[in-house]
Amino acid sequence: MQCFVYKSTKRDDSYLFVVREDDFSRVPESLLALLGDLTLVMELDLASRQKLASADVHTVRQQLSEVGFYLQMPRHWYQDAT
């Protein structure tokens, strides 16, 4: 499974994974607004990976298949919200 990883220009250490390059059609507009401009940082082949640096590769694959995107964000984003 190929995916494309984009870095948020508004939110430090936040990355959006999508299945097709520059295809954000399954990402909610509100999330795109929150992330700001997105810069492509890498293309990954998830089929050949057992690990990712800051996310569980199985979760990423599942979210890409079921939801169409995966958002990797710093832990403090969602810890502060609780």
Image: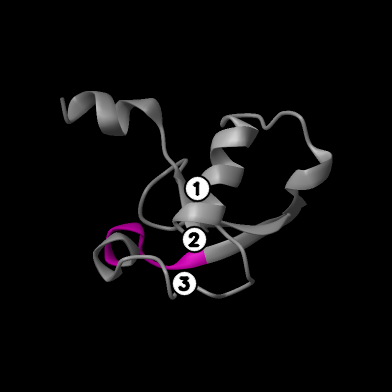
The image shows residue 74, relative to residue 25, as above or below, that is above
Residue lying furthest left: 82
Would residue 33 be visible to someone looking at this image? yes
Secondary structure at badge 3 equals: loop
The image shows residue 2, relative to residue 50, as above or below, that is below
Q: Which mark is residue 68?
A: 2
**Nearer the N terminus, badge 2 or badge 1?**
1
Residue topped by disc 1:
63
Q: Is residue 54 left or right of residue 69?
A: right
At which x and y percent is residue 61? 61, 45
Instruction: Give the amino acid type for the residue marked by disc 1 in the picture.
Output: Gln
Q: Is residue 74 left or right of residue 46?
A: left
Front of the two marks 2 and 3:
2
The image shows residue 32, relative to residue 57, as above or below, that is below
Residue topped by disc 3:
24
Q: Quadrant of residue 33?
A: bottom left
Secondary structure at badge 2 equals: loop
Which residue is rendered at x = 84% and y = 41% of the image?
A: 48
Q: Residues within 10 Å of mark 1 (few under 14, many from 20)?
A: some
Which residue is rendered at x = 58% and y = 29% of the image?
A: 56
11 or 19, which is in the foreground? 19
Q: Residues within 10 Å of mark 3 (few under 14, many from 20)?
A: some
Q: Quadrant of residue 42?
A: bottom right
Q: Is residue 42 left or right of residue 27?
A: right
Query: How far separated are the C-alphas under marks 1 and 3?
Result: 14 Å
At which x and y percent is residue 66? 48, 54
Query: How far separated are the C-alphas under marks 2 and 3?
Result: 9 Å
- Tell me the magenta residue range: 33-38
**Nearer the N terminus, badge 1 or badge 3?**
3
